[in-house]
Image (cartoon, rainbow, N blue to C red):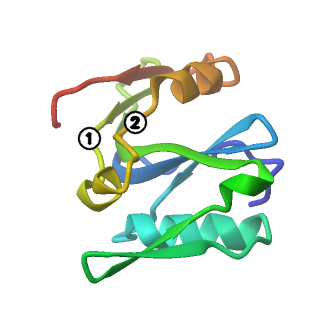
Amino acid sequence: MGLETLVEWPEDGKHRVVQFIVNGIPYLRFGKNFATYESIVEGFAREIKVQPRIINYGGTRLPFLPEDKGYKMPGMGRCKLATPENGKRSAEFFGFSALYMMAGINGIDDNHLDSIRGYFRQIKITHTDRLI
């Protein structure tokens, strides 16, 4: 996977997800298996070949992208992916990371999802405030 891949949609189920913007282009990266938000951020930093800046927050090491270089992390949370029989695949975004929320990232960013929707009209992309 590289920057030519805006989103690599995982199998159906619930997944952690982080929203990124690089040079004005939206990206989504999902955690595999039991990935943490931190590991998703660090993996994307490796993908774009930048050194993440680390903030120690309450004894936890939180990686961030260097925003002074045009990289942004507008949101993160969870996504429930489902493909009903004979139906349109759905991606329902919800939730937040409690640690990153205390550091200023308040859950899923709707503007970022609006940008992603334009690339993936075959998937019903929604956002809910309720926890699933």
- Compared to residue 126, the image places residue 59 above or below, namely below
Nearer to me, 30 or 114: 114
- Compared to residue 120, the image places residue 18 above or below, namely below
Residue ID for mark 2: 108
User: Circle 1: is it few (<14), some (14-19), or many (20+) Cα within 10 Å?
Assistant: many
Nearer to me, 85 or 45: 45
Q: Residue furthest front?
A: 68
- Determine the residue positioned at 49% across, 50% down: 18
Q: Name the kind of residue labelled 1 in the image.
A: Gly
Residue ID for mark 1: 95
Quadrant where the N terminus sits is bottom right
Mark 2, secondary structure of its residue: loop
Q: Are marks 2 and 1 in contact (CB under 8 Å)?
A: yes
- Determine the residue positioned at 62% across, 16% down: 121
User: How far, Cα to Cα, is label 2 from label 1?
Assistant: 7 Å
- Determine the residue positioned at 71% across, 76% down: 51
